[in-house]
Image: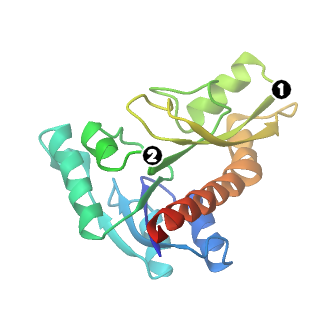
Amino acid sequence: MVRIAVMVSGGGTNLQALINAQKAGLFPKGEIKLVISSSENAYALERAKQAGIETMVISRRNYVSGELFDLANVTALKDHEIDLVVLAGYLSILGPAMIQAYPDRILNIHPSLIPSFCGKGFYGLKVHEEALARGVKITGATVHVVNEIPDGGRILIQKPVAVQEGDTPEVLQKRVMEEAEWVILPEAVRQVTEAIAEEKEK
């Protein structure tokens, strides 16, 4: 069984999509074993507890350096024998120690069609505000592998979403989540868990 950790910072809607997919049997070779939040106030922690998943809070502000923060995350993941890390609305930038500990084993969901509206500073409503300001007709979401460049890793899955007349950033954000993020993140997890499971069986 591929052991999965989900890292969160906020409400946890993408975490909920993964929990629902797991309950539906979408990734039979993987199981969410741990949820790590960068904020003790994240509602995602409640979602995890309701699903019977172990939780931890590891906040950047409790560490004097990014290196120690990374080390705390890596230690927690290794202690739980995690094989795959999924960033689901996780707002802290991961440092080299995390990325080196899990090469090609950290996935992120981003609410645009990378390379548009991505990189440092592009998260949450900011992404959708910029998309509307530029007047794009199609936006969407991307699941990619995490590397040292924010939103710069190999793309796994993308799904387009139409921008509609009169959209506000909030309305567009909700549509992108419902039509793209909640669809492609569980599918990416399914694909990667199957690949890891095959490697383990060799």
Position of 136 compared to 17: left or right? right
Among the 4 quarters of the image, the one containing residue 172: top right
| Residue 129 in the image: above or below residue 19 | above
- Of callouts 2 and 1, which one flags the residue occurring earlier in the amino acid sequence? 2
Image point (50%, 71%), residue name = 47
On screen, residue 118 above or below 51: above
Q: Residues within 10 Å of mark 2 (few under 14, many from 20)?
A: some
Residue 128, quarter of the rendered image = top right
- Give the image location of residue 60, x and y in percent: 24, 46
Question: Which of the labelled discs sits on residue 104, or is there none?
Answer: 2
Identify the residue shown where x is 38% and y is 45%. Answer: 103
Query: Residue 34, how many percent across, how many down?
Result: 38, 69
Question: Colour scheme in the image?
Answer: rainbow
The amino acid pointed to by label 1 is Lys
Q: Please report the residue visible at 56 percent of the width from the left and 27 percent of the height from the top.
A: 118
Q: Which mark is residue 64?
A: none
- Real-space Cα separation, disc 2 to disc 1, in angstroms: 32 Å
Report x, y in % for residue 12. Answer: 52, 60
Residue ID at (46%, 27%) = 121
Q: Inspect the image, locate mark 2, and give the three-letter code of the amino acid beneath it.
A: Asp
* Badge 1: residue crowd in 10 Å (few <14, some 14–19, many ≥20): few
Tag 1 residue: 137
Label 2: which secondary element? loop
Nearer to the camera, 58 or 108: 108
Confirm or deny contact between disc 2 and disc 1 (CB under 8 A): no
